[in-house]
């Protein structure tokens, strides 16, 4: 199944022409240069804690290619390959699905000794974790210049770990909720291995980690199901984790409604549209005069639109939603 959707993201034609990074990105893309100079410029700005200039360049990029180029160059600066052995800050995204008939509050913590034991056979030097699960809002407070400073140190001391001064925020839930949290960690990696070996090892213990998370988060009057995902660089945690969360949130919402409709002998189908910065998913049934549910996949500027369409297409196919209709975007003004 292939989705007949176009990328709805739009970019302003009015951008700061004096922005050094935008100008360099446009020049590199025009001349098909490598991004070595761009990475050096970003590193120099982050060294000087000029986060605002980087933020303006990224958020006011005139097109998708420019935004992608700045994003990719930023993450090469934040995860330098030139350092042979360095400390690597990492995050394990965890999507937590909760059902509760009354409001509950969870303290998202896992037993640190169990966490260390699960990863002990990975043989990564100085591998350590925080037992607390942190929220996206907390991760978002780490500035690029902070991440750059941490990633360019050959070795981080325990007192320098970014989660030392953080306390995890409670998860508050009523009804059905899909929540995103992160386990933060640090280890020493070589230039060649990066996090690839640790990600491969994660596949061996993911089921055990899921069981431990479910036990740690268990509470009365609620059903809780946790889905941990492979470690990624801390700099990529928010975008990576949000993609997982949206996929699972849409899957949960659709599957519940589709099950009920089919038990009632009705035939559900979808109507899809690309809206400004969103993919809109409407669930309908043949005799209905309005959508049963409207869901949105919010697109980040750095998201891989083609990959997200593939994720959704597979999800719809698994749910046997073979009838899909499309409609044009509406009630949006793309003029700048």
Image: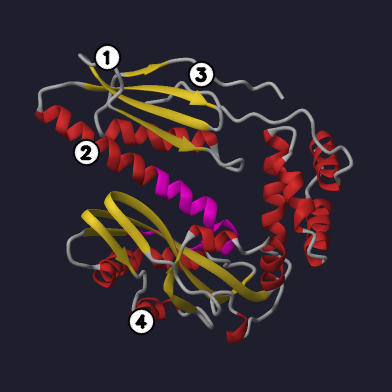
Element under disc 4: helix
Query: Does the CB distance between marks 3 and 1 fall below 8 Å?
Result: no
What is the quadrant of residue 43 in the picture?
A: bottom right
Does 107 sit left or right of 150 as displayed?
Answer: left
268 over 180 or under it: above or below: above
Q: Which residue is mark 3?
A: 329
Of the pair 324 and 76, the residue shown nearer to us: 324
What is the quadrant of residue 310 in the picture?
A: top left
Residue displayed at 41% across by 44% down:
246
Residue 256: mark: 2
Query: Does the CB distance between marks 4 and 2 fall below 8 Å?
Result: no
Q: Quadrant of the C terminus?
A: top right
Q: Which residue is mark 1?
A: 289
Q: Which residue is mark 4?
A: 117
Residue 52: percent from left, percent from top? 76, 54
Q: Which residues are magenta?
A: 227-246
Residue 18: percent from left, percent from top? 89, 42
Q: Residue lying furthest front in this view?
A: 103
Q: Earlier in the sequence, mark 2 or mark 3?
A: 2
Residue displayed at 33% across by 36% down:
315
């Amino acid at each position: 199944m292939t989705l007949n959707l176009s990328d709805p993201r739009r970019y302003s034609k009015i951008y700061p022409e004096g922005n050094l990074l935008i100008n360099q990105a446009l020049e590199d893309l025009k001349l098909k240069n490598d991004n070595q100079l761009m990475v050096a410029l970003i590193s120099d700005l982050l060294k000087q804690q000029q986060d605002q200039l980087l933020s303006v360049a990224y958020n006011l990029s005139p097109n998708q290619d420019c935004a992608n180029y700045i994003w990719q160059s930023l993450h090469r600066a934040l995860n330098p390959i030139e350092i042979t052995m360095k400390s690597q800050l990492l995050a394990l995204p965890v999507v937590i699905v909760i059902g509760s008939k009354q409001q509950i509050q969870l303290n998202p913590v896992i037993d640190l000794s169990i966490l260390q034991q699960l990863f002990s056979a990975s043989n990564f030097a100085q591998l350590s974790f925080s037992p607390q699960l942190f929220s996206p809002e907390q991760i978002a407070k780490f500035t690029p210049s902070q991440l750059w400073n941490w990633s360019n140190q050959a070795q981080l001391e325990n007192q320098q770990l970014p989660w030392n001064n953080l306390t995890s925020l409670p998860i508050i839930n009523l009804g059905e909720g899909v929540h995103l949290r992160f386990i933060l960690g640090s280890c020493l990696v070589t230039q060649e291995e990066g996090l690839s070996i640790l990600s491969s090892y994660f596949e061996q213990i993911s089921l055990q980690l899921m069981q431990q998370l479910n036990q740690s988060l268990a509470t009365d009057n609620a059903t809780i199901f946790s889905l941990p995902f492979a470690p990624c660089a801390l700099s990529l945690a928010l975008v990576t984790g949000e993609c997982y969360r949206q996929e699972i949130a849409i899957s949960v919402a659709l599957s519940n409604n589709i099950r009920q409709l089919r038990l009632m002998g009705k035939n559900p189908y979808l109507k899809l549209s690309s809206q400004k910065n969103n993919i809109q998913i409407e669930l309908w049934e043949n005799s209905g005069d309005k959508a049963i549910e409207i869901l949105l996949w919010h697109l980040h500027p750095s998201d891989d639109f083609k990959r997200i369409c593939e994720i959704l297409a597979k999800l719809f196919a698994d749910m046997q939603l073979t009838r899909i209709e499309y409609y044009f975007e509406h009630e949006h003004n793309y003029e700048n």
